[in-house]
Amino acid sequence: MNWLRNLEDRWVLRALRRGQEPEGRRVLLFHQLFTSHEEAAAAPGLPFEGFTTAQLHELILTLRAAGYRFVAPEAPWGGRQVVLTFDDGYASVRHALPICEAYEVPLVLAITTAPVATGHAYWWDERWHHLRQHGHDARSASRQIERMKAFPPTPSAAPQGELDRPLTVAELQALAAHRLVTLANHTHTHPPLTRCTDDRAVAELNACADHLMRWCGRTPTLLCYPNGDVNEAVVSLARARGYTQAYTTQPLINTLATPPLRQGRFTLSGRLPLEPQLARLRTGLSLPRP
């Protein structure tokens, strides 16, 4: 309903002009990064944000001009801060590094290690492509994928191409060695941890951590929950395994009062105008899902 979104956008922009802009840390969630909207539209897998390199430039410049500081997760808290995170480990995240270098912006890579280890397509992209090829519309395909998340299938297909493939181990190692990059655990096969037994959740966290240690020489203390799903049992498991910070997908501005293992993240859409989305981010008012 475009008229409702336009009304909400005007309301949020007015709130921003009135100075409704609380301090705190805004964590941003992305999955892929494309060189153009045409490239995003051509991607064969599950549609995510469709964000482009030009939009990432605009985002950084706009928030910098508004007095925001881009920081790494371990940076001291204070003022208005932004953390950039990219989940899963798509190869297209490589487009983000030159931009981050140009502006000295830290970058978090939350890696699901099984696809990187095997080179297979992410299972949700494989299923999305299969379902769409067999006549399912986007809503039906999304519902089926959602039902499969508790017990994700083992991917066996090669990616369709450059737009949906995971990083290679060598590419991940090169990124991880960069001074601006922080690694995060995003589990081995990406099941929602709230739907796992304790033993399976621990196995998922340990397998991811072991792969990252073997490949990159470090074990992350930052966790990004698959699908953002978390409960107290999952928090307890994460804390017991030494994770000091963890991100959900709840859109909220984090402060020192936010439980460190339940921090929120905002998602921006590359398919919607960026200005009102950034106004929502700055005010803390709800953002539309991409």
Image: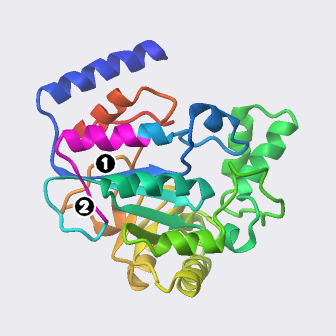
Residue where numbered disc 2 is placed? 258
Which quadrant would residue 198 be assigned to in this image? Answer: bottom right
- Note whether 3 is above or below 159 in the view shown: above
Residue type, label 2: Thr
Circles 2, 1 touching at the beta carbon (< 8 Å): yes
x then y, percent, for residue 272: 47, 28
Question: What segment carries the magenta color?
Answer: 56-72
Q: Nearer the viewer, residue 83 or 8?
A: 83
Q: Is residue 146 left or right of residue 235?
A: right
Task: In the rendered view, tell whether residue 264 sits above or below residue 177.
Answer: above
Q: Is residue 262 above or below residue 216?
A: above
Q: How is the image coloured?
A: rainbow
Q: Please give the residue where the numbered disc 1 appears in the rendered image.
A: 252
Farthest-out residue, right: 134
Marked residue nearer the N-terminal end (2 or 1): 1
* Quarter of the view holding residue 73: bottom left
The answer, for residue 67, to whether it is visible in the render is yes
Q: Secondary structure at mark 1?
A: loop
Mark 2, Cα crowd under 10 Å, few <14 / some 14-19 / many 20+, is: few
Question: What residue is rendered at 35% in x and 63% in y?
Answer: 262
Q: Residues within 10 Å of mark 1 (few under 14, many from 20)?
A: many
Label tally: 2
In the rendered image, residue 278, in percent from the top left (x then y), is placed at: 32, 35
Q: Is residue 60 magenta?
A: yes
Which residue appears at 80% of the width and 34% of the height? 136
Classify 43 as above or below 75: above
Say left or right for 216 vs 56.
right
**Which mark is on residue 281?**
none
Residue 80 placement, left or right of 193: left
